Image: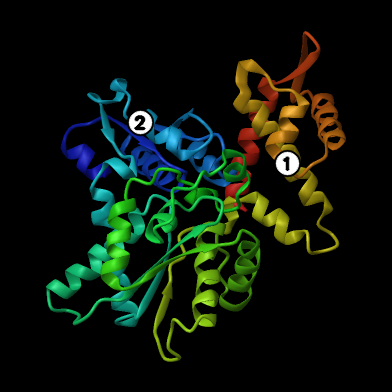
Amino acid sequence: MISHARSWDFQKVICASNGNQGASIAAYTSLEGMTCINIIPSEIEIGKKAQLIAYNSKIIIEGNTIDDAINSALAPIYTKEYYQCTPEFNPLTIEAQKTMAFEIFKDIGFPDWVIIPMGNGGCLVSIWKGFSELKESGVIEKLPKLVGVQSEVCSPIVEAFLHKEGGTFEEKNILQSKARSIMVKNPLYQAAAIRAINESKGTALVMSENLILSSIGDLARYEGIFAEPASALTIGALTTLIQHHKMKHDDIIVCLITGSGLKAPYVLEALSSKAKTAGMGGILSTKLKILSQISISDKKGIHGAKLKEIIGSVSLPAIYQHLKELESKKLINRKKQGKKVLYFITEEGKKVLDAMDVLITLL
């Protein structure tokens, strides 16, 4: 994309994403000395945000979910001077991602099944395009069955595939999901993804959030791969498909793993909570979450009860204890407005938050 933007003499690019594509775009624009704006939702893995900061991308936070951020990328202000790098709006995304099918065939030959996590459905559509082109060129004689996987918290493509009435996906649950990078309420590639699954004679599955952490652990323990939650869904789907006799004993199966678990500190916290010595990691992670949410609120400020509502897993007294400690370190300050006490991040707090973001990325 950046090469294409350069060939058209663009000096600025715009990208709305949940982090992975945005981080890549930021890295390459930094290399080329171009201006990069990344529009991201407020609820993004801190490790992905850290990469954007490290690559000196300008960050605009828009809404709580990727759906809000994507809509903002089409604002009139970006239509003339900015090259569009948002995955949903640039066909080079599909052309690039389809080469995963070529890599799979080169490495292991023809697979019988490919299991793919779905957010907007673009990754599945890309892989189907890649395999279809291999077949059209005579490299392979048949096509693999595709399995699209989504979290139970937000599964519009699966519901449409199963001909269920459109579900209402609550934003509160979406914001608390472990598989944040595939939380897309209105997927652009939904129809194309369903068509690809049907043409491949595959299927689509919904996975329970409870299976995510166990799948992450299994993948790390048995394969030496530490995956982000959205990726680990494919391992849970594999178990389900085997149990329901959808697969033969000698089938060749590919589970697509799309991101590293190191970008999601809440995964590290949840996994380490199984150990007796995990207390300090949880405390630091909670403070980071609180500081991040106060930063997002910017000039509006945020009160303790709202922080409790957003973070969810921490009691209100614990929230206020963390706030007291952050205030004592001069990372936040408070102002009373009416009956409410609002908290604001200080310049020192912003520096600490940015430093912690980058540190997590380097772990």
Q: Secondary structure at mark 1?
A: loop
Q: Position of residue 182 (x, y in %)?
A: 48, 51
What is the distance, in whole Å, between disc 1 and disc 2 at their CAs?
Answer: 30 Å
Q: Are the two marked residues, 1 and 2, in contact with CB atoms closer than 8 angstroms?
A: no
* Frontmost residue, 248 versus 299: 248
Q: Position of residue 68 (x, y in %)?
A: 44, 33
Residue drawn at the location 13% of the way across and 72% of the way down: 136
Q: In what quadrant of the picture does the N terminus appear?
A: top left
Q: Position of residue 310 (x, y in %)?
A: 68, 36
* Frontmost residue, 325 versus 124: 124
Q: Of the numbered discs in the image, which one, if any, rests on residue 27?
A: none
Residue drawn at the location 76% of the way across and 44% of the way down: 284
Is residue 102 in sight in this rendering? no
Hey, what amino acid is under mark 1?
Gly
Q: Please give the residue where the numbered disc 2 appears in the rendered image.
A: 73
Lower position in the chain sequence, tag 1 or tag 2:
2
- Residue 297 left/right relative to 241: right
- Residue 217 left/right relative to 284: left
Q: Is residue 99 above or below residue 144?
A: above
Is residue 219 in sight in this rendering? yes
Q: Is residue 316 above or below residue 281?
A: above
Q: Secondary structure at mark 2?
A: loop
- Residue 125 left/right relative to 324: left
Q: Position of residue 122 (x, y in %)?
A: 33, 53
Residue drawn at the location 49% of the way across and 67% of the way down: 234
Q: Residues within 10 Å of mark 2 (few under 14, many from 20)?
A: many
Q: Please give the residue where the numbered disc 1 appears in the rendered image.
A: 312
Hey, what amino acid is under mark 2?
Ala
* Frontmost residue, 48 versus 311: 311
Task: Name the front one of labels 1 and 2.
Answer: 1
